Image (cartoon, rainbow, N blue to C red):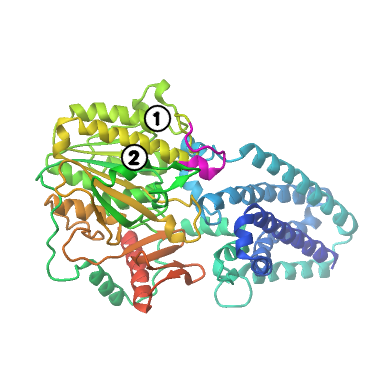
């Protein structure tokens, strides 16, 4: 029985480690923990214990097998293998635990396999972490590994010296085999039909408490294994014909007429599409320490057609660029650009403009390979690309590559010589982590929020200057400029998650018929495609997920998705945000009924089914 006590004690040490990690996580995010409340946070330890036990059992099974081999390999080899095995587990587990804390602050969900998808672009991955306290994290990790390793080794030494191994006791071996087999129970999370999953530890109406209950090591491994086997639709919850009817009704205009309100005067205007990194609607007309965050944009929106209630389709650039250029909704648990054979089947704006005789170009100061976007963009119909390698070394003044001001100068010079008509897309980058800028700091502060807002202030100034330069060019009178975000942002912090997805969209240019107008109707980032094509009388039928925001009669709604969840918006005052893990509404406002919930679920179900079918 001593071997069983040894294995059981080993199992308990992992549970204690995971509970300690949860405590550190709670303190690291103390503001959210305080808002959640002490009672709910304490419950997260209790409910999270079930997942801790599951992960500890995964780690303990092989430990037991090594113990069972003792009669064959001897005491010295057994001790060595147990020590090596424990340290080999401890190193990646501690990395996951430590990386999870700043990742949660940035993304709002526990660490999963998503960051691995960006390792093919190591420079951009490093740039994204540049504002993190890396030295402190590495130092903490080293101390933790050394300390816990020492404790683990001392534990193995003390236990093994008394039991190992007396005689080749058949009864002892059989009991240890039984104990090993019983580990399947905590691994599955109990005797219930469904095996352990994240929803098993959800218990609260406070989402932070639910997320705190998750064991991040378990979450990471679960995400990794499921990403590798993502070939079925996990969001199918409505009868397929019913879901199809709901989608058809959503995409149809509110009446038989689909006449668009004409806003563009020219039949073949130049189009400049500015996709602004992380341009959240929370900063429009806002101030920080008395400094206006986006003064140029606030001024420009009084000169053009401003869409005040638009929502990003997803939460990352690779999802946003597909939303803008292909009018395609984001997936909650993956991204279509990661699968080139699927992304290749999407309709694409630049391809249509190219067919109409437009000169098409794409400008970005970083590396196009980031998040596998190059494959998607190269097949999108762009005839010319300008990226990091097209700038001199002295102009690559950002960790990502060339700052927005540098890219803007090149774009401005080359558009002045571009033959009309042209369709040019500029993806900005300076407001991406680490929020560095080459200009004098306007919004002071070293915290993430101040750095982020200052980077938006910088890009706002760059875009304002760009528009002023365009106004001086002969092409301006026959040009439409669209400014839209690739996605929103968690900063500045808001209690309502929906605010992280609300983004601005502004149409400017001499080709616009009506100036200084606000469109308050709710819409999505993916609706830009059909809206702009219908204005230019280009066939938009291939953009089946996109709606015309300027149709005389239209259905105002928006759908967005995030890491295993989605949001459904009827308008600013009526919406809900749904958590797929907990299978519940996590945020709600206004008049929401069962039909709205079905509509949101139908969008998630059918859009993911469409992704799988490509």
Q: Nearer the viewer, mark 2 or mark 1?
A: 2
Magenta residues, start to end: 441-453
Q: Residue at x 68, y 51 (%)?
A: 89
Residue 23 falls in which quadrant of the image? bottom right
Q: CA distance from mark 2 to mark 1?
A: 22 Å
Residue 573 percent coordinates (x, y)? 37, 67
Q: Secondary structure at mark 2?
A: helix
Q: Residue at x 31, y 27 (%)?
A: 409
Q: Which of the two discs, 2 and 1, labels the residue nearer the N terminus?
A: 2
Residue 328 in sight from this viewpoint: no
- Horizontally, residue 161 falls left or right of residue 553, namely right
Q: Nearer the viewer, residue 140 or 82?
A: 140
Residue 39 falls in which quadrant of the image? bottom right
Q: Nearer the viewer, residue 269 or 578?
A: 269
Residue 480 percent coordinates (x, y)? 19, 43
Q: Secondary structure at mark 1?
A: loop
Name the residue tied to disc 1: 402
Residue 491 percent coordinates (x, y)? 48, 50
The image shows residue 216, relative to residue 376, as above or below, that is below
Q: Residue at x 15, y 39 (%)?
A: 358
Q: Nearer the viewer, residue 188 or 484?
A: 484
Asked whether residue 93 is drawn in magenta, I would say: no
Q: Nearer the viewer, residue 2 or 465?
A: 465
The image shows residue 349, relative to residue 576, as above or below, that is above
Name the residue tied to disc 2: 296
């Amino acid at each position: 029985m001593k071997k069983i006590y040894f294995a059981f004690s080993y199992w308990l040490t992992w549970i204690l480690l995971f509970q300690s990690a949860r405590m550190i996580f709670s303190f690291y995010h103390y503001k959210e923990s305080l808002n959640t409340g002490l009672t709910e946070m304490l419950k997260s330890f209790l409910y999270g214990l079930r997942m801790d036990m599951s992960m500890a059992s995964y780690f303990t099974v092989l430990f037991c097998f090594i113990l069972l081999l003792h009669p064959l390999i001897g005491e010295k080899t057994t001790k060595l293998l147990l020590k090596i095995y424990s340290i080999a587990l401890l190193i990646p587990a501690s990395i996951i635990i430590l990386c999870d804390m700043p990742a949660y602050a940035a993304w709002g969900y526990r660490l999963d396999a998503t960051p691995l998808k960006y390792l093919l672009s190591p420079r951009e991955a490093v740039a994204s972490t540049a504002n993190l306290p890396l030295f402190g994290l590495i130092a903490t990790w080293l101390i933790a590994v050394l300390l816990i390793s020492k404790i683990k080794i001392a534990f193995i030494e003390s236990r093994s010296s008394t039991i190992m191994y007396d005689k080749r006791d058949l009864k002892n071996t059989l009991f240890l085999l039984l104990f090993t087999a019983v580990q399947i129970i905590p691994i599955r999370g109990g005797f219930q039909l469904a095996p352990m999953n994240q929803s098993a530890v959800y218990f609260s109406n406070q989402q932070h408490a639910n997320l705190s209950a998750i064991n991040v090591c378990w979450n990471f491994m679960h995400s990794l294994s499921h990403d590798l086997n993502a070939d079925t639709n996990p969001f199918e919850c409505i009868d397929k014909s019913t879901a199809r009817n709901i989608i058809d009704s959503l995409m149809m205009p509110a009446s038989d007429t689909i006449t668009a309100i004409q806003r563009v005067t020219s039949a073949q205007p130049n189009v400049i599409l500015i996709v602004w990194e992380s341009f959240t609607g929370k900063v429009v007309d806002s101030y920080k320490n008395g400094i206006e965050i986006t003064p140029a944009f606030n001024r420009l929106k009084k000169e053009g057609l401003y869409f005040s209630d638009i929502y990003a389709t997803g939460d990352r650039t690779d999802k946003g660029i597909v939303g803008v250029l292909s009018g395609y909704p984001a997936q909650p648990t993956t991204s279509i650009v990661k699968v080139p054979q699927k992304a290749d089947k999407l309709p694409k704006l630049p391809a249509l403009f190219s067919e109409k005789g437009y000169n098409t170009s794409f400008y970005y100061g970083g590396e196009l390979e980031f998040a596998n976007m190059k494959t998607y963009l190269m097949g999108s119909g762009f005839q010319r690309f300008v990226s990091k390698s097209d700038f001199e070394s002295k102009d690559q003044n950002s960790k990502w590559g060339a700052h927005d001001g540098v890219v803007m100068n090149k774009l401005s010079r080359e558009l002045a010589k571009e033959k009309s008509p042209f369709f040019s897309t500029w993806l900005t980058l300076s407001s991406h982590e680490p929020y560095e800028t080459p200009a004098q700091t306007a919004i002071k502060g070293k915290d993430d929020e101040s750095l982020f807002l200052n980077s938006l202030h910088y890009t706002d100034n760059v875009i304002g200057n760009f528009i002023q330069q365009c106004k001086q060019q002969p092409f301006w009178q026959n040009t439409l400029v669209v400014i839209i975000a690739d996605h929103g942002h968690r900063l500045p912090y808001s209690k309502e998650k929906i605010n992280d997805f609300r983004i601005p969209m502004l149409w400017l240019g001499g080709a616009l018929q009506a100036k200084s107008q606000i469109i308050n109707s709710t819409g999505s980032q993916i609706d830009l495609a059909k809206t702009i094509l219908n204005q230019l009388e280009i066939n938009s039928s291939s953009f089946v997920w996109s709606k015309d925001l300027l149709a005389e009669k239209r259905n105002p709604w928006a759908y967005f998705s995030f890491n295993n969840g989605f949001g459904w918006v009827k308008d600013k005052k009526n919406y809900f945000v749904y958590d797929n893990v907990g299978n519940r509404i996590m945020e709600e406002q206004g008049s929401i009924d069962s039909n709205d919930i079905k509509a949101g679920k139908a969008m998630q179900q059918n859009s993911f089914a469409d992704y799988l079918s490509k």
